[in-house]
Image (cartoon, helix red, strand yellow):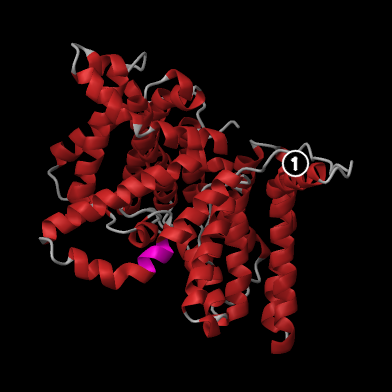
Amino acid sequence: MLFNSFNFLLFFPIVTIIYFLLPHKFRWIHLLTASCLFYMTFVPVYILILFFTIVVDYVAGILIENAPDDKKRRFLVLSVVANVGVLCIFKYYNFLAENFNQLLHIGHSGVNIPYLTILLPIGLSFHTFQAMSYTLEVYRGNQKAEKHFGIYALYVMFYPQLVAGPIERPQNMLHQFHEEKKVTYDDLVIGLRKVLFGLFKKSVIADRIGMLIDPVFNDLHHYSALVINLSVILFIFQLYCDFSGYSDIALGTARAMGFNLMVNFNRPFASKSISEFWRRWHISLSTWFNDYLFNPLVASLRSWRRGAIVFGLVLTFFLSGLWHGASWNFAIWGVIYGIALTYEFFTRPMRIKLFGKLPLWLNNILSKLFTFTFISLATVFFRAKTIGATFFIFKRLPDMFGEVKHAIAKPGGLVGLLGDIDRVSLSVCLALIIILEIVHYKESKEPLDKIVARQPTFIRLGIYFVLISSVYMFGVFNLRQFIYFQF
């Protein structure tokens, strides 16, 4: 993979400058060409996969719009089967083959399903879901079919959000590609500021945390329970800064050209419940599953009453887990969230009555603490390489209390528990997380863009200087990919 956070930044200013130098009628060609080149830096021939689904969905959209009501569904099914089929072949075939082979081995059948030696195209799940949202919205009558093939192809392939979202809806993006964009000071400043914040979160926080905790997850037996606990907590911040950092870069890159993408994160660690967390984390994916799977499924099973909610939540999050990766770890991760949300749904009146007796400040603190703890523990399934490693981590986590108790009794004992982990890097990472959460707290009062924009010029320039200097001096540029590129 040739693109990381650094050379992405070398790509986008060139594309943006050329974009504004071109007449409006040629800009879509330029953006589409740039998007194709961006995607082809991975495996060039995989552009044909995108081209196939783009053609299918473009034609399907027109057929759905023009077909009689009783025939619209068949063209929608054609589109969905094509998209899900490509996803299954490249992302899930080997996973399914492995599990079927294990079952066949148990039955001593002597038959083996062959594996495919193929790479997973970057961002396949993202642009597949974005393409599916187009035909689904056309089918529902919420979006007119796009007649301009190049504009539709650009909607699927727009390079800032092609490989890691946000997963856009056609109502938000298609009309923007038709509109003539002007160079504005606000768009450039806001866009570049978002890119800078995103780059800081990715290269300074996420990648530095990654360098610290990757050795721990790669050799769990070598580290103390205290270090494993710290690594579990640090990983959720790494994941957030990596993914939200990419989202900020994507939003900023698009905004510099005058395009507005949807916000994908909204201070998720301020959540006081699991349901609130999913309204704040990866918003474009959670709303996609809510609009196109959960709500229609529950509506179709309304005779099941509350059972429809339970079935809908567990199935939706099971599929959400598999969307993230073809492994049982991701599937279990999704089911855990489905069960947790089911628990919240059924116990909400009781919890309101119980915790309503507490002072509001204490209620808020406990709710946020419980939610963050659950999220961190659930994310172990997301990070651990195998189910065995996952349960080893869970087995070791409680041992921290005994370790700390014994370590306190001897001089330097707590420091000794850290083993050979880089203490300076650990201190820097913890300090950066504290700064991040202070910024998040400030954002709860007023959007960060507005906070920065209303500062005097010398303070704004100082903020930019500190961020740029931090990225230059402490940023990690070692071809470390964005985590969500693999999805």
Q: Foreground residue, 368 or 181?
A: 368
Q: In which quarter of the image is the N terminus?
A: top right
Residue 139 in the figure: left or right of residue 420 = right
**134, above or below 105, in the image:** below
**Residue 103 seen in render:** yes
Q: Foreground residue, 339 or 66?
A: 339
Q: Foreground residue, 136 or 329?
A: 329
Residue with the most extreme left position: 359
Residue 282 in the figure: left or right of residue 67 = left
The quadrant where residue 84 appears: bottom right
- Dominant secondary structure of the magenta stretch? helix
Tell me residue 192's x, y (percent).
35, 43
Tell me residue 450's x, y (percent).
21, 53
**238, above or below 448, in the image:** above
Instruction: Kindly identify which residue carries mark 1.
Output: 45
**Residue 68 seen in render:** no
